[in-house]
Amino acid sequence: MHSKIQNLISTVKESGAHIFYDFDDEQKYIDNLIMYITAAIGLGNHVMIIENDRIMPEIQNRIKTLFNEKEQEMIHTINNYDFYCYRGNFHKETILSYLQNMISPFLQNNIPIQTWAHVEWREQEEIFQSLGEYEMEADLIIQASNLITICGYDSNRVPDSLKKILMDCHDYHMTDDNIRIIERKTV
């Protein structure tokens, strides 16, 4: 999977990409995240990781083990609960504003950045519609800024109706062991 991630990032480094990662195996998910960080840093890019409190300690331990101090300074982490539930629930406008504010300093200073976000949510009314709307609007931001971003979703929490929406607003579909381009429908 390392070469697939490396090849994808090299291919889209100028144009950016919005990648839907539908994961089943948490250990492979973490391994793929570490490969993504390695590939990004290899290109001289910073990486913003939006992850939960349960997984973050293992990621941080691996970062300390695998990357030198200068490389570690290129890795930025945010708690995904703080990111996605800043107002207590999943609020699309707040999250999109947070995303823009988060990446703006990098873009304004011509510092290349990639993101990796583990998308999670509390149970709330119409959450799948909100997630779909968020991803569609995030896609516009990603396209405008040529950002490379992976949106990780635990496949156990993604019903077919949401998966269809996510497939319609991402450029690539990634699983624990594969990456493929999504042929988007043009309107």
Image (cartoon, helix red, strand yellow):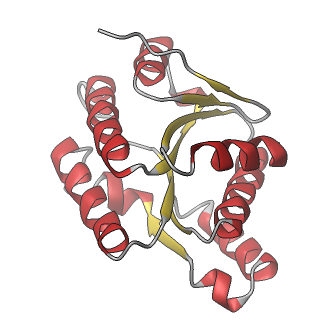
Which residue ends up furthest to the front in the rendered image?
14
Residue 72 as seen in the image, left or right of residue 148: right
Above or below 68: residue 99: above
Q: Does residue 121 show up? A: yes
Say which residue appears at 31% left-offset and 41% top-offset: 138
Residue 137 picture quarter = top left
Front residue of 30/103: it is 103
Quadrant (top left, top right, bottom left, bottom right) of the N terminus = top right
Residue 3 at x, y percent in the picture: 83, 46
Above or below 43: residue 178: above
Say which residue appears at 24% left-offset and 24% top-offset: 126
Residue 66 as seen in the image, left or right of residue 75: right
Above or below 183: residue 35: below
Residue 123 at x, y percent in the picture: 34, 35
Residue 146 at x, y percent in the picture: 41, 49
Residue 161 at x, y percent in the picture: 43, 12
Above or below 164: residue 30: below
Quadrant (top left, top right, bottom left, bottom right) of the C terminus = top left
Residue 35 picture quarter = bottom right
Say which residue appears at 74% left-offset and 44% top-offset: 7
Say which residue appears at 78% left-offset and 45% top-offset: 28
Q: Does residue 50 show up? A: no
Front residue of 15/171: it is 15
Q: How many marks?
A: 0
Residue 106 as seen in the image, left or right of residue 175: left
Front residue of 111/48: it is 111
